[in-house]
Image (cartoon, rainbow, N blue to C red):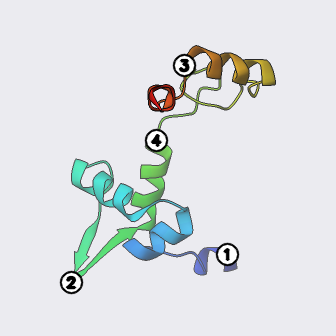
Amino acid sequence: MRQELSRRHAWSIKEFSREKKIGRDAIYDAIRDGRLIARKLGRRTIILDDEGEAFLKSLPKLELNDPRHRFGRSPKTASDVSADSAASPPANLETAVAK
């Protein structure tokens, strides 16, 4: 019961951003896109706790085998790095050769 009384019921954009570790631009984008419901109180924009939690729960789950994410993949080895650098010569190579 005591824990329920101390629960936060509304957040400003700045507070929500700081507490949830989400950038302000991402929050405003989500509001603009209709993915996050915000309310106005005078000039202040507030996010109700329930709406903020619903937004966070609606975010897609991270798929560890998705190649777009570095999670779940082994880090590059030294041979991978040397193969990458051998495949593409430095951009200033023509300038160095011309001198």
Q: Are marks 3 and 2 in contact (CB under 8 Å)?
A: no
| Amino acid at the residue labelled 4 | Leu
Q: Nearer the viewer, mark 3 or mark 2?
A: 3
User: Left or right: 33 with respect to 97?
Assistant: left
Residue at which label 1 appears? 3
Measure how far apart labels 3 and 1 are at the Cα level. 58 Å
Kindly identify which residue carries mark 4. 59
Residue 95 lies, in percent from the top left, at: 45, 32
Numbered circle sitting on residue 88: 3
Element assignment for label 3: loop
Amino acid marked by disc 2: Arg
| Nearest the eye: 46 or 18 | 18
x then y, percent, for residue 4 = 61, 74
Q: Sequence-wise, which precedes: disc 4 or disc 3?
A: 4
Q: Which residue has dot 2 on it?
A: 43
Q: Give the residue drawn at x 37%, y 55%.
A: 26
Q: Residue furthest front?
A: 99
Q: Secondary structure at mark 4?
A: loop
Residue 57 left/right relative to 64: left
Q: Please name which of the two marks, 2 or 1, marks the residue nearer to the observer.
A: 2
Residue in view at x 58 percent, y 30 percent: 69
Answer whether labels 3 and 1 touch (C-beta < 8 Å).
no
Q: Is there any visible trace of residue 86 in the rendered image?
A: yes
Local SS, label 1? helix
For mark 4, does the 10 Å Cα neighbourhood hold few (<14), some (14 to 19), or many (20 or more) residues? few
